[in-house]
Amino acid sequence: MVRLITYFELHDSPYLILEPCDQNLRYEIAQYKRGLHAPKVKRIILQIVLGLNHCHSKRYIHCDLCPESILIAKNGVVKIANFDHAIAHTQSESSNNSSNTSFKSNNNSDEPEDANKPAIHMAYTAPEILVGSSCIEFAADIWSLGAVTCELLKGKPLWCELTKKDQLQQIQDALGPLPSQRHFCLPKLLESFEPSGDWSNLREFLPRIPEDAFSFISVSIKQQIFPSIP
C-alpha cells in the first residue's frame, strides 16, 4: 500500500501527503504494446495480491483497482493507491455469517454518483458495482485483479466499453447472463438485456494467454461472479 506521510486541512478540505512513486502501471503497459513478459507480470501481480490481502484484512474493499491506481517505485516495489471509491466491509448479523456491505449508489444510470468524485475505471470494475448493487464483497477486487492481469499479458483491456450498459453487455456476451440470484439483483439497466453470444468458454476469448495465467484469470473473473461456469 502507498504510505501516508502526513495530512492537513486547508479551507475545510483535507490534503494527504503520500510517499513519492515514479510511475503507475499504465505507463508500464504503454511500454509493451503486446503485453509484458510473464515473469514480470507474476512479480507485479504477487505484490498486488499482497497489497489487496492487507487491504481486505483491514476489511476495506478498494472498488477501483486499475493500472492507474497501482504505482511503481524506483526499486520496482508495487503500491496500491487511489482509495476514492473504497468502502468498509461490514458483517451482517442476518446473513448466517456471510459478509456484506452497504454500498448505495446511483449506478443505474451512466452518470457518476458524485460529481466531485473521480469516475470509476469501468474496464476493471466488477458487474455488481456497475449495476449499483447494495451488496459488495471482497470478490469485486478479485475481478479487477483478473482484468488487470489480462491487460498486462495482452497489452489491452479485457473489456473496453464507454458506457456501463455496453460494458455489461460485453461481459454477458463473453461469460453468459449475469446470475441475479447471487449477491446482487439486476436493476432496470439490464431489463432488456439478451446476451448476443454464448461464449461460456473464456479460453476462446483469451486464446494466447499462457495456461497458468489463464487459470488465474479464470478464477478471478469467472468463478468469483459466475461459479456455475465450467
Image (cartoon, rainbow, N blue to C red):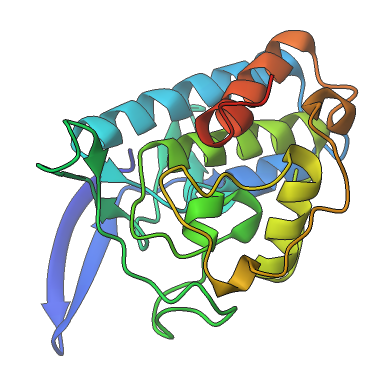
Considering every residue shown, the one lying at the far bottom of the view is 11
Residue 111: percent from left, percent from top: 55, 82
* Quadrant occupied by the C terminus: top right
Tell me if I can see residue 159 in this picture: no
* Quadrant occupied by the N terminus: top left
Tell me if I can see residue 131 in this picture: yes
Residue 188: percent from left, percent from top: 57, 74
The one of 33 and 178 positioned closer to us in this rendering: 178
The one of 108 and 42 positioned closer to us in this rendering: 108
Considering every residue shown, the one lying at the far left of the view is 93
What is the quadrant of residue 134 in the picture?
Answer: bottom left
- Say left or right for 146 vs 14: right
Number of callouts in the render?
A: 0
The residue located at (45%, 65%) in the rendering is 132
Q: Is residue 143 above or below residue 24?
A: above
Q: Is residue 191 above or below residue 29?
A: below
Residue 157: percent from left, percent from top: 75, 46
